[in-house]
Amino acid sequence: MKDPSRSFTETSVVKVEGLQSRLAEETLAVEEPLEIQLVHGPANARSMKSISVTMRTPGDDFELAAGFLMTEGVVRDIDDVSQIVYAAENMAPTPEAREQIQSLLSDQPRRNIVRVELAEDVKVSLANLERNFYTTSSCGICGKASLLALQTFCPPRIKNSFSIHADIIYALPSRLRDAQSVFNRTGGLHGAGLFNAEGELLEMRADVARNNAVDKILGSKFLRDQTPLRHSLLLLSGRASFELLQKALMGGVPMVAAVGAPSSLAVRVAREFDIILVGFLRDDHFNIYHGAEHIQRQTSF
């Protein structure tokens, strides 16, 4: 599924140092649209609908689609998905997506449309999907409505028993950076890493959009029937938004650590659903916004 050659491209730039300049080649992270189409319904009445167009770094597209559907509550189990395929080479995007895609690309590669076919017995409420996607996106919807939406469709929760030592948390960002080869070449990708309590990197994905990086990593586990992820920590290379806490919740992740700041609504989600949340993670300090009792350390208060 991964095609590294599509993840980055080369361009010419003028590098300026002081008052001197020179021509050079620069590596850029690729950004292209991906349309996700959903096929569902009984055998005698199958229907197809475009449910999302997202800007992403090509690669791990099937994982991205699966992770998106899982975190939006459309699928709960790997058996809900019968197959995921790229659209046929001569397949045009749906009318809903065509204008968005054509405004971004003059020549759309065939691998910019992914079609997810659900099992015949999976019931899909498109109205609920559109409503959930709207009210659980980080676009300014009020916190109360967003939390109510999460309470409605999040999977059953169990007591959070995850525990980790502070020394291990400090080491995680450097381990994630070491695994981000494309980021090291371009500097333009967000990374997400899944670790166990011993600090072992279990999975890593990167993308121009932080939500896509998380969808890819959760989708990879979902497609291997390894969710919910009750014994893993999700590390974010940037900030922690409501949307990313939502995705962690839907994936059963008990702890989220972010190099950047959490939003106020992300903290509310962590406290409402008992997700350990760490922000401003650096080599020698971090803030705990919820779940301090799960992190082993010395205390001075």
Image (cartoon, rainbow, N blue to C red):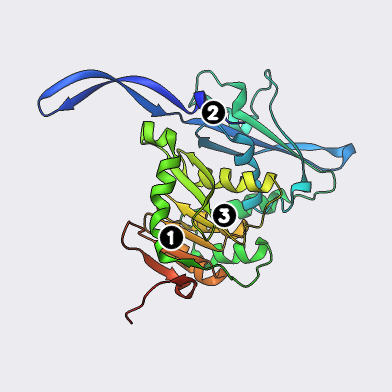
Return the x and y of residue 28 as percentages of the image width and height: 38, 28
Please name the amino acid that badge 3 sits on.
Answer: Lys
Q: Is residue 50 left or right of residue 183?
A: right
Return the x and y of residue 148 as percentages of the image width and height: 59, 66
Kindly report which numbered mark, 3 or 2, lies closer to the viewer in this rendering. 3
Please name the amino acid that badge 2 sits on.
Answer: Ile
Q: Nearer the viewer, residue 20 or 203?
A: 203
Return the x and y of residue 201 as percentages of the image width and height: 51, 49
Residue 88, quarter of the rendered image:
top right
Label 2 SS: helix
Instruction: Examine the rendered structure and indicate whether residue 251 appears above or below residue 99.
Output: below
Residue 263: in sight, yes or no? Answer: no
Q: Nearer the viewer, residue 134 or 159?
A: 159
Sequence-first tag of 2 and 1: 2
Q: Which mark is residue 247?
A: 3
Residue beneath disc 1: 168
Q: Is residue 176 left or right of residue 119?
A: left
Q: Residue at x 38, y 48 (%)?
A: 174
- Marks 3/2: CA–CA distance: 25 Å
